[in-house]
Amino acid sequence: MSIDGKPIRRSKRRWKVAVIGNIKDVNQPKPEGVPPDAFADFDTMETMDALRAAIETDGHATVFLHADKDLPYALKKYKPDICFNMSEGLGGDAREAQVPALLEMLAIPYTASRVLANGISLDKTLTKRIWRDRRLPVAPFQEFTFGDEPLRPELKFPLFVKPAREGTGMGVDMKAIVNTEAELRERAQYIINAYQQPALVEVFLPGREFTVGILGRTDAKRFSRHPEWYEKDGYHRFPILELDTGNTEGPWIYTNEAKSKDVGPEGNEGFFCPAIVDPELEKKLKHLAYRAHNIIYALDVSRTDIRLDDEGNPRLIEINTLPGLTPGYSDLCLQAEAEGISHTDLVLEILYLAAGRWGMLEPRELEETKKNGK
């Protein structure tokens, strides 16, 4: 399918774009009673500044707004045309859906997935149940609400225990793998008490670990700045990124500590991108990420983590509907770089895909549509 070459047209020449996020403050003491890795998925101001700089290259005006209790008043004051949403939420159930819900109520356009998908994706147990019901491969799992529930017979040790509703490896350290009933009960009780939420217990997957980024939707070419990126179905599959699990002794897990380190320092877990995998496995991983994205109604961008079981079969771990966008660091940015897509182009693409959904762009006419007289 070819494009007629005409540029996409905006509803107005310049947009007021609010970049919304939660910021880590290393100098701010954590409230009493929160787990040690609380707020680990918050961004830095440097990341927010990089997003604003990318958006401003295309002539738009930007402002950063904190995703806190004052956000409704800030939105009323600034009156953005569209928001670039990176907010993690302040706590509670489905916290990543808090800002999207507010923006929906105020009828303000915003980027990426909407309320439902953001609410589902942070709940790992619910996500796995939906995927399993749609026949996508997941490891056997069980949610523990109290910690003393009978263990289902299909769950064989070693098992992996983590919070059911957190991201960025929160609650994941070297004690997450348990080998006995006593260890399981102790770890599950720790997660339930420390994180004030259920513990997700699943069969430990010992194989290679990958993450696969997805961009686009069925009509992406009509609003994209780079329609050539997309396949016939309207989606772009980024090169697969593999985590280097070969430089550790014993079982390897992607802990919160590992996720918080810089990319590439000596002794740190590394990354291979594009991953060296046989064509059949590559095709399967990308298809699983595509299906995982669409089954939970994710929009425009996501990143899905997949790990191989002891027989080499891929199993879906989780999906991130708000993938990090720190240049040169976040997994999705590394995948984009691997095929020559700049951070600026990636950010603007996410912005323009959203703008197209919210009626802020005049859709580009496709030559195939013209030929068919539609």
Image (cartoon, helix red, strand yellow):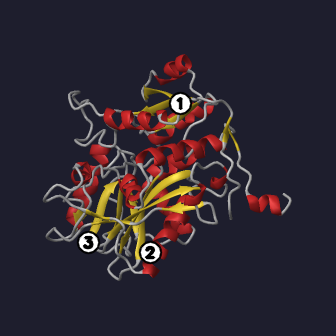
Quarter-of-image position of residue 87: top left
Q: Is mark 2 on a helix, strand or loop?
A: helix
Residue in the foreground of this view, choosing between 93 and 101: 101
Along the polypeptide, which appears first: circle 1 or circle 2? 1
Seen in the picture, residue 4 relative to 152 is either above or below; the reply is: above
Q: Distance between the residues labelled 1 and 2?
A: 38 Å
Q: Mark 1 points at which residue?
A: 60
Quadrant of image for the N terminus:
bottom right
Along the polypeptide, which appears first: circle 3 or circle 2? 3
Please state which amino acid type lies under the numbered disc 2. Answer: Glu
**Side (left or right) of 2 relative to 94:** right
Q: Mark 3 points at which residue?
A: 158
Q: Position of residue 20 (x, y in %)?
A: 45, 32
Q: Position of residue 98 (x, y in %)?
A: 50, 36
Question: Can you see residue 274?
Answer: yes
Tell me the residue at 47%/33% (across/down).
56
Q: How far apart are marks 3 and 1 (CA)?
A: 52 Å
* Eye-nearest disc, 1 or 2: 1
Asked whether the beta carbons under mark 1 and mark 2 sit within 8 Å of each other, the answer is no
Please state which amino acid type lies under the numbered disc 3. Answer: Pro
Q: Is mark 3 on a helix, strand or loop?
A: loop
* Eye-nearest disc, 3 or 1: 1
Which label belongs to residue 282?
2
Q: How far apart are marks 3 and 2 (CA)?
A: 27 Å
